[in-house]
Image (cartoon, coloured by chain):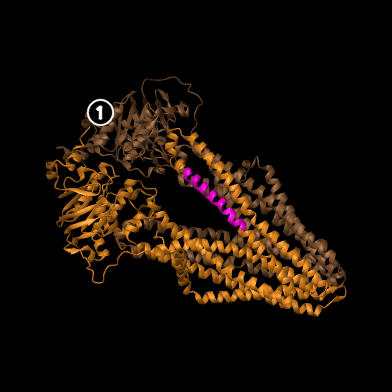
Amino acid sequence: MSKKKEPGYDRKRTLRLILAHIGSYKWGLAVSILLAAVSVALTLYIPLLVGDAIDCIIGAGNVDFAAIAKILVKIAVSTGLIAAAQWLMNALNNRITYRIVRDIRNEAFEKIERLPLAYLDAHPSGEIVSRVIADTDTFADGLLMGFTQLFSGAATILGTIGFMLSIHPGITLVVLLVTPLSLFAAAFIAKHTYDMFRLQTETRGEQTSLIDEMIGGQKVVQAFGYEERSQKKFDEINERLRKASLRAIFFSSITNPSTRFVNSVVYAGVALTGALAAISGGLSVGGLSCFLSYANQYTKPFNEISGVITELQNALACAARVFDLIEEPAQIPDSHDARVLEKAEGRVELEHVCFSYTPEKKLIEDFNLKVEPGQRVAIVGPTGCGKTTLINLLMRFYDVNSGSIKVDGGDIRETTRASLRQNFGMVLQDTWLRSGTIRDNIVTGKPDATDEEIVAAAKASHAHSFIRRLPDGYNTVIGEDGGGLSQGQKQLLCITRVMLCLPPMLILDEATSSIDTRTELRIQKAFAEMMRGRTSFIVAHRLSTIREADMIIVMKDGHIIETGKHEELLAKGGFYASLYRSQFAH
Amino acid sequence: MFKLLRFMRGYVKECILGPLFKLLEASFELIVPLVVASIIDRGIADGDRSYVVRMTLVLIGLGLVGLASSLTAQYFAAKAATGFSAKVKSKLFGHIQSLSYTEMDTLGTSTMITRLTSDINQVQSGINLCLRLFLRSPFIVFGAMIMAFTIDVKSALVFAVAIPVLSLIVFGIMLVSIPLYKKVQKSLDRVLSLVRENLYGVRVIRAFCREKSETECFSKANDELTSVQLFVGRISALMNPLTYVVINLAVILLLQTGAKQVDSGVITQGNVVALYNYMSQILVELIKLANLIITLTKAYACGDRIQSVFELESSMSYPEKLTVERENNDAVTFEHVSLTYKDAGAPSLTDISFSVKPGQTVGVIGGTGSGKTSLVNLIPRFYDATEGRVLIDGIPAKDYPKDELRGKIGVVPQKALLFGGTIADNLRFGNENAGLDELEAAAATAQAADVIASKEKGFDEPVAQGGKNFSGGQKQRLTIARALVKKPEILILDDSASALDYATDAALRKSIREMEGSPTVFIVSQRASSVRYADLILVLDDGALVGAGTHDELLGSCPVYEEIYYSQFESDSRKDGVRA
């Protein structure tokens, strides 16, 4: 992502940003910490009370019921207070965490809407999605755990030490000396299991990718009788994974029993020193019982905190990834005095345009083109020749490196993006539809369209007849990416979407590639109507669809190599001519 | 889910020993409060220092034995869980591979992948945890209660009341919150799909200037997610305080009854301490148990999903041996064939009949969704015809053993898909033992020689998964070569030249025609130029065969073909040909 920085830099920045986000909830957080302190103090007070009560129960006929009753009331009151404090604290922590995460997600999403296309094209969508969803989720978990367990854990440790010291400093020393052992044990095991876990993760990744490949391509696998070989491959990885998992799971599961053992040593130590102290009269039995329960409580937060710290580190790493996205520079905003393009006439001029996605690979150099209102420009060339580059520039998805593109005489960089794009109707090769109803999809560009307008547009694009046959007509819900519709139907919907707005300029990118030629003919009639009087840029594979263009731009390997009319280019005998003739070659 | 347990066979020993050792550990833990009680009652009361030391050693000893048995238990549990999941995975992978196209269509690839990966992992950790904790936690809870009863029946009654109340709280909260967590997941899915949509549709969204309304839409979904999360959070935040209150109320009751019992001389002071300790143990275990049950419910659901795949049987069966005699001398015969996909409302092919002689080239043309791919998919029996018969070499496709039928036929699917490995690995996909010369010959015929030559390592050039490091046209040529390496008797090209320019397409068709062994070739295409010189052109329209013959025959007789042809080729009669 970003270039290598000092190792400490990222962490500091991430912490600073997290703190900034916590900032608006700082009062809530302060209350939460206060509640944690109250709840911990009272929680620790209870064993003390129980110890006192036990001291009142000495033997047959030697029980101070009045004192016990008083103590029990104290216990009851403390319990009530603790419960209330804990619940409030948890609820508060939940609220703070989820609100912070909500804020971060919103910011990330807003950023996505404003990021330059160059960034989005260069980063796999899956990766960005995982930042906004999975990373923020992990961050939320870590933050929540940090809030709920870190404070109360630390408070518990400090509080216990204080209470223990107040009862008997000698025994406290024993506890203090032995407990670090459990931390060492946990850290030692964690360090040594790390490699095993990594091996497990790697092997699992290997297996998943094999599964993905073989099941994803199963039709081919079956057609070529590859099943046995793929099963063999699978079983080999599977066995390796089994061994790796066994080791990872077993060795990591040592942690709990080991720390439990250390705890029981602490417990035994307290029992020993406590009992000896009791014999010599330095400690009451109630005090011993109290100590024993402290010994139990005291070691637990250590284990929890070591868990929380790993979790927090993970959370920090995830937060850093989300913040990387949020801090990514957005596209240059429209300037205040930018021109608002009303209904454009459709004069498009490209003057000395230079453009390339990466500086190393020059694409378009010093390109000039003048399109009069209402003219039809066809862009042709083999697949992957960079035809979409021109669209990227016209729609201002990318800005030119030098030179200028003018619409109606004004540079498009000095025009608001919104008004520029509203003047273009675009049908792209990859038919993107959103989950929702058919109607939702059609009205994308004109949310307030009436039913009549929608039906008229659908009729014009020949989509009406298939939409009508869908179970709920225009209200049929389609899944993500138009799931359930055929490629051709999806394309018809994309065309309808543009038909509804009918902007003064059109961009049609392979718009009919997935529609059979007969339907295409019908759509072309509609297109022809639509294009009348409108400046249009058409990218198409089929030469027959572009013969009638006023101008043809021939592209190859990202470069524009020829421009002119059909007849001119044929006469020239260049690349276009050979492309055209090959249609008849056999 | 329980049916999956059959894969536990072979790990029975581990499944019994694991929990057993866990119980052992738990028993040792239960003895601890008793030892402490005796330290108080005998050691402290009598001032017997050596007794205290001895009992301390017993405590440490108990800890050690507990550690040892716990480690043994963990090992057995891990071994059984990983062994089980490896077995299930291998069997499930094999099973999925045996499913026919029909089942794959209904189930969907991504579902099958989740079943094989995350679902099985969930089951694995469920089993692991179950073997470790499922016996331990209840054992400690009830063990602690029984131990309490052995100390003093009257005080132990407090346990008998507290445990059901605690269980009610713990499981009640779980029961309420589990469905709510599903709701959280659903809201999260919604947020996720909005992000995905906005990334994939970024150009359309910006072209229509929808950035603002999209952001509003997202923020609404995000708010919904947050509010569900908060609601669940508030409920599960009840767990700790409530259990804490119950335990402490129990402690108060315990102290009260304990005080009375001690006062009347029934129990000792040490006994009261022991009872108090047992109460603390119960709380810890109950919370562990609750977590275990959450994991188990998840594992159970995943197990059910896995089992449902196992129960899905391939809708096709193949005979062991070919036992039928040849009926005719054709390479391929269709007799009144109709095909209706599973759960589809209308047939995709209706009443198709034609026959093809060996070595002939057949062109299949028609509009989108006219049934071209459906037709050729019947030849290698990817699907079964719902009506009529498909004969290959004069024998019904259904009477062939799977390998024999698929061995005859080379398919180049519409979507050019390569696999991870080298180019050579990919070309040998259907014929493991093909020599380098055979690969070269196939590549040359498929016009792929220059693709290979352009790569630094030639045939050993690595191919990324899905063939991502090759362009569309390169992939198509390599998939054609892959089919040719099989030396098929029947070659099916399903619109597999769409990414090639017209010249390469033409050269490809020429070299295939000149191939040795002269296979029967099916060319599916939308381009009239690709099928124009075929021996037989099948024209499909909406699943029906509306024309069959050569180019010249069809031009005069088949309006659909004329329409397609003239829409792609300039002609004087074009205007007359189009009846829109």
Say if B353 sits above or below B117 in the image: above
Q: Between A134 and B562, which is closer to the camera in this rendering?
A: A134
User: Residue B270: x and y, percent?
Assistant: 82, 68
User: Residue B553: x and y, percent?
Assistant: 23, 28
User: Residue B370: x and y, percent?
Assistant: 32, 39
Say if B320 sits above or below B121 in the image: above
The residue identified by callout 1 is B550
Amino acid type, residue under disc 1 in the picture: Thr
Q: Is residue B318 left or right of residue B560?
A: right
Q: Between A464 and B33, which is closer to the camera in this rendering?
A: B33
Q: Is residue A297 left or right of residue A439?
A: right
Q: Is residue A250 visible?
A: yes
Q: Which chain is orange?
A: A
Magenta portion: prevailing SS class: helix
Quarter occupied by residue B515: top left
Q: Which chain is brown?
A: B
**Which portion, as a residue range, is magenta?**
A188-211
Q: Is residue B506 left or right of residue B225?
A: left
